[in-house]
Amino acid sequence: WLENAMDRMPILAELGITREVHGAISHPPDGNPLIGPAPGLKNYWCCCGTQIGIGWGPGLTRELANWIVSGTPEINMREFDPRRFGPYADQSYQITKAKEDYLLRHEIPFPHFNRLEGRPVKPSPLHDALKAEGAVFEEVYGHERPRWFAPEGVEAKDIYGFRRTALHDIVGAEVRAVRERAGVMDISAFTKVEVSGPDARVFLDGLVGNRLPAPGRIALTHILNDAGRIELETTVVALTEDRFYLVCAAFFEQRLVDNLTFALKGEDVTITNRSSDWGAFALNGPRARDILRACTTSELSNAGFKWMTAQEIEVGGHRLWAFRMSYAGELGWEFHGPRDAISGAFRAVKLAGKAHGLANYGS
């Protein structure tokens, strides 16, 4: 490249090289800088990991200054937030991903490109079973989440392009299965945090924009910051009067924990992060009730198990929490509980679903 530069600008050859500068280039695991609050620390900020300092410096430091002074940036800084990584990103992980990022630095940035090095880090309790059924995974906050499922005769490997690829029809078949029959999805990657204690309701009521649900009910709401702006969206399940279960995107695990922890002002509240020791899966579609009915003795009618309510039930002999909710637009439940219980319940649902054309579907 140096010879090409001299051919293009002959004066470079005439002047000669007077000084060599070797500047280290940062390579964070995903290639983006770390700008914002340090994970788990209050009033400690990061401004590092930039690959293009001159290009990124003015804008990033402006937003960081706004963030420090006013408590919130003016634009969405999610892709740069240091809290997008968790304890799983240890030194070995960082080195592996830095090498990967270096090699990808000038490759074509296809949409939804899947970085494969250093994985899996946090496989779900359903990972091996779904991999055997053709799951193609993506990594989100260290979790392995099924992206799509390769049908028979198709390699379980991502297909990239800037236009419609063969994945369109494959994913379309998963969508039709959920709409016409039933589908099951591993949602263990969700952030799962329990807030409990005598002051739990009063404490949470001061942080969210919506009304908190009554015991046994579910509400969708937002965690707000001191300026009244949205920090993140979360589903709140009132397991009991003083025990709440919060579910949000995997990406926001540390962000949710920090928001809750830093908001405490002496209240009698316990915050428990269950994101790794609990799993979850969803069952959706018009035949979901028929499939679930074969796995439990609990009442599943609309009257017995109402929309946006939660019950602790047994599925295939395994006790877990069932939430009557669905983001797929169809009849459905989510199941949350300890990893072993989730694995056992999932096997029971899959077995019962064979007679109903139950299909896997991805994110």
Image (cartoon, helix red, strand yellow):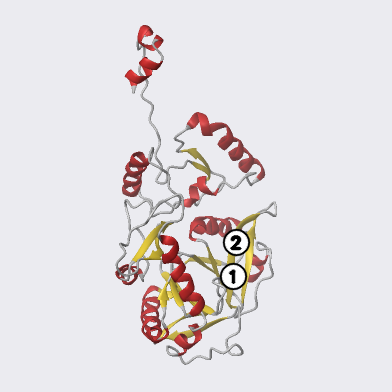
Residue 209 percent coordinates (x, y): 68, 63
Q: For residue 234, say whether it is visible.
A: yes
Q: Quadrant of the N terminus?
A: top left
Vertical relation: 236 (above or below) 346: above
Residue 111: percent from the left, percent from the top?
45, 50
Q: Amino acid at mark 2?
A: Glu
Residue depicted at x 41% and y 68%: 277
Q: Is residue 164 above or below residue 62?
A: below
Mark 2–mark 1 contact, CB under 8 Å? no
Q: What residue lies at 49% left-to-right and 84% top-to-bottom?
A: 287
**Residue 28 image position (x, y, % from top left):** 41, 42
Q: Position of residue 193 (x, y in %)?
A: 51, 66
Rounded to the nearest angstrom, the CA distance separating label 2 from label 1 is 10 Å
Mark sitting on residue 233: 2
Residue bearing the label numbered 1: 236
Element type where label 2 sits in the image = strand
Along the horizontal axis of the image, is 198 left or right of 361?
A: right
Frontmost of labels 2 and 1 is 2
Instruction: Give whichever of 303, 108 is nearer the camera.
Output: 108
Disc 2 crowd, CA 10 A, few/some/many (<14, 14-19, 20+) = some
